[in-house]
Image (tube, rainbow, N blue to C red):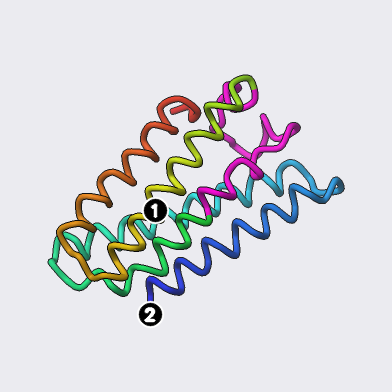
Amino acid sequence: MRAWVVGGLALAIGMTGLAQAADLAAKPDDIIAGRQAGYDVVSGMFAAMKATVESGGSVKPLAEGAKGIAAWGAAIPGMFPVGTETGHNTKAKAEIWSDRATFEKDAANLHDAAVKLAALADADDKAGFAEQWKATGGTCGACHRAFRAR
């Protein structure tokens, strides 16, 4: 149940951020705050998944959370509209806007990896889920190395 709630929150935050990004009246700081909150939720979901993997518990309850992460991967490009390069303590690098194609490809990689993760959770495949959890985390790391300031 907890995984479903967290996954649903990730999706809701992502969709709220997209709505803000589409609203030309939205303040850049609000959009940045929305995307930061989305990343915080995804980070929490990954931590919950790690605890489940390490404990050897059933991964089936994590399917909805993985689906939320997949939705977040699809939403990420919309969370970085022009005009949100600075402010609200963002760690976004300028390369997000100067190398948009790579940024969007990296976000799509997160989406695709999380879709696989959700399928493994639905099947309650603990070993497969553990491996795909690492691969999904790797997609996050690749994007952060290229597009997030430390």
Residue located at (60% from left, 65% from top): 12
> Front-most of 30 and 11?
11
Q: Residue at x 74, y 56 (%)?
A: 19
Q: Position of residue 99 (x, y in %)?
A: 59, 21
Question: Dot 1, how many residues are within 10 Å of its Cα: few (below 14), some (14-19), or many (20+)?
Answer: many
Q: Residue at x 28, y 61 (%)?
A: 49
Specify whether 80 is left or right of 102.
right
Residue 65 highlighted magenta (yes or no): no
Q: Residue at x 70, y 35 (%)?
A: 84
Residue type marked 2: Met
**Mark positioned earlier in the residue sequence (1 or 2):** 2
For the C terminus, the image quarter is: top left
Local SS, label 1? helix
| Horizontal arrangement in the rendering, residue 83 relative to residue 100 (left or right) | right
- Residue 28 placement (x, y as % from top left): 74, 41
- Horizontal side of residue 126 vs 94, given as left or right: left
Instruction: From the top left corner, tell me how far across and down residue 64 is, in percent.
Output: 42, 69
Q: Which residue is mark 2?
A: 1
Report how far apart the C-alphas of labels 1 and 2 lie in the structure.
18 Å
Could you classify mark 2 by the number of other residues whose Cα lies within 10 Å: few (under 14), some (14-19), or many (20 or more)? few
All told, the count of numbered labels is 2
| Residue found farthest to the bottom | 1
Q: Is residue 79 magenta?
A: yes
Instruction: Report which quarter residue 143 is drawn in.
Output: top left
Q: Secondary structure at mark 2?
A: loop
Q: Where 132 falls versus 61 (above or below)?
A: above
Q: Which residues are magenta?
A: 72-97
User: Which amino acid type corresponds to the residue marked 1 in the rendered image?
Assistant: Ala
Task: Tell me, for residue 114, which label it has, or none.
Answer: 1
Q: Which mark is residue 147?
A: none
Name the image quarter holding residue 128. bottom left
